[in-house]
Amino acid sequence: MSFFDTLAARIDSADSVVSVGLDPDPAKLPDHLADHDLPRWAFNRRIIDATHEHAACYKPNVAFYEDSDGWRALRETVAYAHGKDVPVLLDAKRADIGNTARQYANLLDHADAITVNPYLGRDSLEPFLAREDKGIIVLCRTSNPGGKDFQNLTVGNDKKLYEYVAQRCSEWNERGNVGLVVGATAPEELERVRELVPDLPFLVPGVGAQGGDAEAAVEYGLNADGVGLVNSSRGIIFAGEGENFEAAARQSARRLKDRLNRYRD
Ligand SMILES: O=C(O)c1cc(=O)[nH]c(=O)n1[C@@H]1O[C@H](COP(=O)(O)O)[C@@H](O)[C@H]1O
């Protein structure tokens, strides 16, 4: 089964397009988890318990796990999410020259989908694109303020770089496994990318802590089949503090789900 078929089924069963970002910043973890063998895993387990019924997907960003305990915490987290029937999108933003990219693509042995960056070109993505059953989600127009520095430059005669990226990715979607990252903080670009590539599912980060446009995220982030994801990380996992942080996370995930569902067909 392809990643997007799995995701479509999950969106349907959870009635949700919420991607819960698992970015367990060690500086923000509740004190009572500090003595745990793997505090990030202890935190994620509680977050997953609290939010899984509202989650279409979990999106751990590997930046929060790139140390020896972190990789262990990530492995436990992925297995636990799968145990709740929720797919996992590894936010790694990788790509490199061919032989290195082949190694990076092995990350997909541990997850259902991955984010990659397109700036080294087609061959740098090929080892990822070859994984037919996995989702390959390519950065197109990112949500950060500097997203416009390069991505909005006009290249060639009349197109923005992010527009080229969208069109190339659509051509590279020979196996039906490609999606795009387009931030909710750039609603005009989001609308434009949807116009250019009507069929690709988008991962739309930037709602919640970054203040992006939730309505645009749903209107343009989902394809005609209603497949796509709207991610919030800090806005959900750090909604509360202290011993009862899970309750606030649950409420925040449910609220985001309900809010986004108001804009779904
Ligand atoms: O690829 C991403 O997920 C991503 C792309 C982008 O343009 N902007 C963006 O914020 N993200 C990621 O989405 C998450 C957003 O986190 P919050 O701002 O806490 O909701 C982080 O893991 C970011 O790295």
Image (cartoon, grey):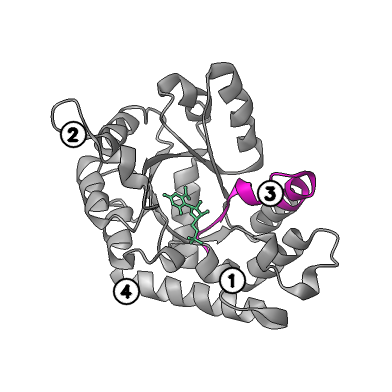
Residue 245 versus residue 170: which sits nearer the camera? 245
Q: Which residues are magenta?
A: 54-75
Residue 52 placement (x, y as % from top left): 59, 67
Distance from Cα at disc 4 to Cα at disc 2: 33 Å
| Image mark for residue 65 | 3
Helix, strand or loop at disc 4? helix
Q: Which residue is mark 1?
A: 238
Distance from Cα at disc 4 to Cα at disc 1: 24 Å
Residue 137 placement (x, y as % from top left): 44, 41
Amino acid on which the number 1 mark rests in the picture? Phe
Residue 31 versus residue 131: which sits nearer the camera? 31
Residue 30 versus residue 205: which sits nearer the camera? 30
Residue 151 placement (x, y as % from top left): 31, 39
- Residue 212 appears in the rendering: yes
Within the magenta stretch, is there residue 57?
Answer: yes
Q: Are marks 4 and 2 in contact (CB under 8 Å)?
A: no
Circle 1 Cα neighbour tier, 10 Å, few/some/many (<14 / 14–19 / ≥20) = many
* 187 versus 146 height, above or below: below
Helix, strand or loop at disc 3? loop
Q: Of the residues tagged 4 and 1, which is closer to the observer? A: 1
Q: Which residue is mark 2?
A: 159
Distance from Cα at disc 1 to Cα at disc 2: 39 Å
Residue 154 placement (x, y as % from top left): 20, 34
- Left or right: 262 in relation to 5: left
Q: Which residue is mark 4?
A: 262
Indicate if the residue with disc 1 has its beta carbon within 8 Å of ligand 1. Answer: yes
Identified at 37% across, 27% down, the residue is 174
